[in-house]
Image (cartoon, helix red, strand yellow):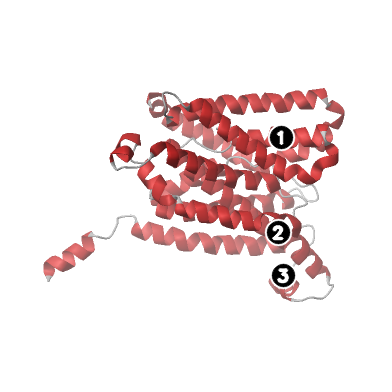
Amino acid sequence: MRVKEEKSVTSIHPLAKKRAIVLITLPILLFVVSIGSLMIGQVSFSVGEVFQGIVSSDDSLARRIVWEIRFPRILVGIIVGMCLAIAGAMLQGIMQNPLADPGVIGITAGAGIMAVLVMIVFPGYLLFLPIAAFSGAFVAAMIVYILSVKKGGTSPTRIILVGVAVNAICGAGTNMLMMLFSDRVQSVLPWLSGGLMGVGWVQFESIIYYVLFALLLAIYSIKHIRIMRLGDEMAQLLGHNVEQSRLFLIVISTLLAGLAVSVARLVGFVGLVVPHMIRLLIGGDYRYLIPASAIGGALLVVFADTIARSVFNPIEIPVGILLAFIGGPYFLYLIHRRGNSIATN
């Protein structure tokens, strides 16, 4: 009997308590920040007015601002944060590198150059801007993957190095387009800065079903990531098709990142910062890391968007710029901390 009791105690994972706290606390924080975001802005409302604005169907000011402007914007912010954070967590798992991120390996830069091409060269086809952005992200990811193949296989290090090069090329292409069509640059700058300005129910309804599909794929992919994190050789010894899984996971990551970029433009660093911080709290088990990163990403984007549109009211700062101020120093910290280990991988 005593042996059974000791066994039941020792079988509890040392991070179980932390994981439970994080997975309970993050949704509560997200709810609180979302309510605060509904209340704060050029026009402020009480909690009661926010509630009335959501449930009532009258034509009051609270209804028009809360339901038609702020509520869909928060929902899209939650979606964007979840997609970027999960994409970052998946890429970090595939590459076995904490610096992997859709922005680092060229996925968002690919989306950016296609979006700028449509806005500058084909301004009459802005309706297809989300499709163009997603197509650019997908093409960039496939170029990175194909150029990383060597002797029938890929390696995380090669994918990151090729991704950095593709990222630089796409960035140069974007700058070249802006120089050649400098008279139309003003229409492009808000998009490149990233943000949720002008986002509403139309954008939410345009991507919600694709996002749900991508999230189901991400949940299904958790078992593949756990095996891939054991290393290519061990995964192959277990009978796992490493290359097939790597390509599958990259496609899902690209789908998630492309969906986020298609509505929130170039919002960076969420996929880098959030999974890494969550990993420090609850460890690298992807059964917990993926859902916690999703909620953490949503929390960060909604919080940053609230700050971006409130602090310098009536001027709204693009949330992409605000997140760059947060993510940039954190990225440098990661490079400084992990530089030696990265160099030896």
Task: Please provide percent x and percent y for residue 115.
Answer: 73, 37
Task: Please provide percent x and percent y for residue 117.
Answer: 76, 32
Instruction: Work out whether mark 3 precedes mark 2 in sequence or the reverse, and give the earlier one.
Output: 3
Task: Please provide percent x and percent y for residue 197.
Answer: 76, 49
Which residue is denoted by mark 2 in the rendering?
Answer: 205
Instruction: Work out whether mark 1 precedes mark 2 in sequence or the reverse, and give the earlier one.
Output: 1
Residue drawn at the location 72% of the way across and 50% of the way down: 196
Cα–Cα span, label 1 and label 2: 23 Å
Question: Could you tell me the amino acid type at mark 3?
Answer: Val
Residue 163, above or below 304: above
Mark 2 crowd level (few <14, some 14–19, many ≥20, 10 Å Cα)? few
Cβ atoms under marks 3 and 1 closer than 8 Å = no
Cα–Cα span, label 3 and label 1: 39 Å
**SS at circle 3:** helix
Which of the numbered marks, if any, corresponds to residue 50?
3
Left or right: residue 204 versus residue 92 is right
Asked whether residue 318 appears in the rendered view, the answer is: no
Which residue is denoted by mark 1 in the rendering?
Answer: 114
Which of the numbered marks, if any, corresponds to residue 13?
none
Name which quarter of the figure residue 267 lies in.
top right
